[in-house]
Image (cartoon, rainbow, N blue to C red):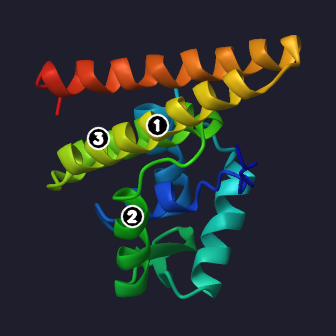
Amino acid sequence: MTKQVEAPISPEPVLLGFMMLKPRHPYNLYQEINRELGKVWHIGQSHLYAHMKQLTRKELLVVQTETQSNRPARNVYAITAAGQTIFLDWLHQPTQHGRHFRLEFPARLYLFRRLQLPGLDHLIAAQTALFSERVLSLKQARQETQDSYYKLVLEFRQCEMSAIIDWLDHIKSGSMI
């Protein structure tokens, strides 16, 4: 079994997904993310502002300054066509690492439903196929190792992946999509 290199989880695709709904000020975005995904996904307000600036530098968002009567001007961000493409590519990709599944997949599920986008059934099928391959790979690695501790670790990971597959089957068969 080859070791997979895990990229860190970035909130940027989730931010782009929320920006698909409408242009907004980062504080409004912060409040909405906390209200809608706060039980699954957390981002600090200062981190959100930093990511918004970074997405603007990458030209995935554009910013306009809005004047307000009796208040300081504020920045309102909107997603660009490039930002939409990046987001949609991310949205349709299965989560690669079981460790990231708990955060990424519920966010994908939420955004598919919130944006009323087609393709969630294809994502679930791709996620199931990916993790089914991993279960077989973990099973093979368990059979090949002589290290009893490593066998336990591999068995845990195999059970974890199998539980995720069962949950995916549950949401698919329960018409949750």
Question: Image check: 138 left or right of 177?
Answer: right
Q: Name the disc covering residue 124, or none.
A: 3
First in sequence: mark 1 vs mark 3: 3
Residue carrying label 1? 131
First in sequence: mark 3 vs mark 2: 2
Residue 114 appears in view: no
Q: Residue 43, percent across and down?
A: 65, 44
Q: Residue 79, percent across and down?
A: 40, 76
Q: Is residue 167 above or below residue 79?
A: above
> In front: mark 3 or mark 2?
3
Q: Name the disc covering residue 19, or none.
A: 2
Q: Which of 27 and 171 lies nearest the eye of the viewer?
A: 171
Q: Please, what secondary structure does the residue beneath circle 1 have? A: helix
Q: Quadrant of residue 107?
A: top left
Q: Amino acid at mark 3?
A: Ile
- Kindly identify the residue that appears in the image at 29 percent across and 48 percent down: 123
Report the quarter where the N terminus lies: top right
Question: Image check: 115 left or right of 165?
Answer: left
- Kindly identify the residue that appears in the image at 46 percent across and 20 percent down: 162
The CA distance from mark 2 to mark 1 is 30 Å
Q: Please, what secondary structure does the residue beneath circle 3 have? A: helix
Q: Amino acid at mark 2?
A: Met
- Kindly identify the residue that appears in the image at 72 percent across and 65 percent down: 50
Q: Amino acid at mark 1?
A: Phe
The CA distance from mark 3 to mark 2 is 23 Å
Report the quarter where the C terminus lies: top left
Q: Is residue 48 above or below residue 137?
A: below
- Which class describes the residues within 10 Å of circle 1: few (<14), some (14-19), or many (20+)? many
